[in-house]
Amino acid sequence: MKSIKQVKNIKGKVVLVRVDFNVPIKDGKIEDPFRIKKALPTIDFLHKKGAKIILITHLGKDGSASLEPVIKSFFKISKYKKSEISFFENVRKFPGEEKNDPTFTRKLASLGDVYVNDAFSVSHRAHASVVGIPKYLPSYAGFQLEAEIKNLSKALNPKHPFLFILGGAKFSTKMPLIKKYLKLADYCFIGGALLNDFLKAKGYEVGKSLIDNSNYGIEKILKNKKLILPVDVVVKSSGKLINKGVTEVLKDEIILDIGSESIKMIEPYIKKSKLILWNGPLGKYEAGGGGATKKVLKFVAKSKAESIIGGGDTVELISEMKMEKDFSFVSTGGGATLDFLANGTLPGIKALENSKK
Ligand code: 3PG
């Protein structure tokens, strides 16, 4: 894979930069411009070298969203003039994007002379603007893509003691990751909705909590000594939040977070670790839980361990707490981070490696 640092003679050339400005938006306002900020070093580098930059991004799942709020936020943050940087339309508007259709890809590629991928967080998608264009144009990895690979790779060849913290939902998609890190890490701490599946498999009542139910193989995982499960949880019971033991949840309650004893329980593991990898929140903060994630993030921030944090919701929280600098690396990826940690590569990375141009 060629690095953007190797780009030569691009003065006056058109560079197509795939960025991922798929950022959280509420009522037309960007809630967290983290991904936009992280693409700036690549854009600045190319701009200084005299390239004509066209940014390509998707926004939302189906391409119906207007890029307007994103474009506005980009120019406000970057301080570029509108005449200096161009935006392609929301690329998912075109059916050929997700299909990686060769005709669409060729049209996209014909807009530029050089391609740069600085969109790690969408590099798990085999879409035209991610894996297609490198077949037609000289292609390079941007600074953020390189930083993601470099930092996330530390978890694949870890220092020990190594603590893996996994939260969020979707047990079935995280199963390969749990299996892999039970081998690579020294301790695996589970929180978030994932925990509900473990508690259910242990035969405990989980009330109306979110469950994946496709947890094939969980019994074997439960026997692994590296697995650390919370001992208490915060439940919503008749509109109130109550801290209780994991065996005490009632039929009409919903588990929203890990409990106070579990927060204390994880602290010594954080203190003794040299590497901490964390993906996904420990509780559902939109629903009133989630306090545990903030507390545990503060422990990690204070620790001497190298800390690598990923997952959209966790990262949004870190931005809100203005704590990005307290961690060694904060990933821009959600699903892409999980896939990279599970497989050590992504389709977008392979496309750059295979680019003949
Ligand atoms: C993300 O937010 O994880 C990326 O932008 C990818 O978006 P997608 O899940 O819609 O492909």
Image (cartoon, helix red, strand yellow):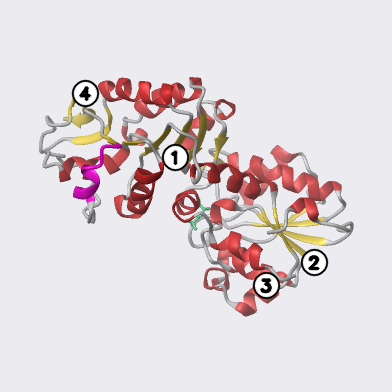
Q: Judge from the rendering whether residue 200 lies leftward or rightward of residue 195; answer left or right.
A: left
Tag 3 residue: 135
Res. 231 in view = yes
Of pointers 1 and 2, the one earlier in the residue sequence: 2
Label 4 neighbourhood size at 10 Å, few (<14), some (14-19), many (20+)? some
Tag 4 residue: 243
Residue 244: % across, % down:
18, 25
Distance of label 1 from label 4 (alpha carbons): 23 Å
The question of residue 224 being in magenta is answered with yes
Res. 28 in view = no
Q: Nearer the viewer, mark 3 or mark 4?
A: 3
Residue 104: % across, % down:
63, 75
Badge 2 amino acid: Asp
For residue 113, the mark is 2
Query: Relative to residue 276, is residue 137 depicted above or below?
Result: below
Q: Quarter-wise, where is residue 292 in the image?
A: top left
Q: Judge from the rendering whether residue 266 lies leftward or rightward of residue 71; answer left or right.
A: left
Of pointers 3 and 1, the one earlier in the residue sequence: 3
- The answer to whether the residue labelled 1 contacts the one labelled 2, judged by CB atoms less than 8 Å apart, is no
Q: Secondary structure at mark 3?
A: helix
Tag 1 residue: 313
Label 3 neighbourhood size at 10 Å, few (<14), some (14-19), many (20+)? some
- The answer to whether the residue labelled 3 contacts the one labelled 1, judged by CB atoms less than 8 Å apart, is no
Which sits in the foreground, 141 or 82? Answer: 141
Q: Residue at x 50, y 27 (%)?
A: 305
Distance of label 4 from label 2 (alpha carbons): 59 Å
Distance of label 2 from label 3 (alpha carbons): 12 Å
Query: Relative to residue 139, is residue 213 depicted above or below?
Result: above
Q: Residue at x 22, y 56 (%)?
A: 216
Q: Residue at x 45, y 22 (%)?
A: 298
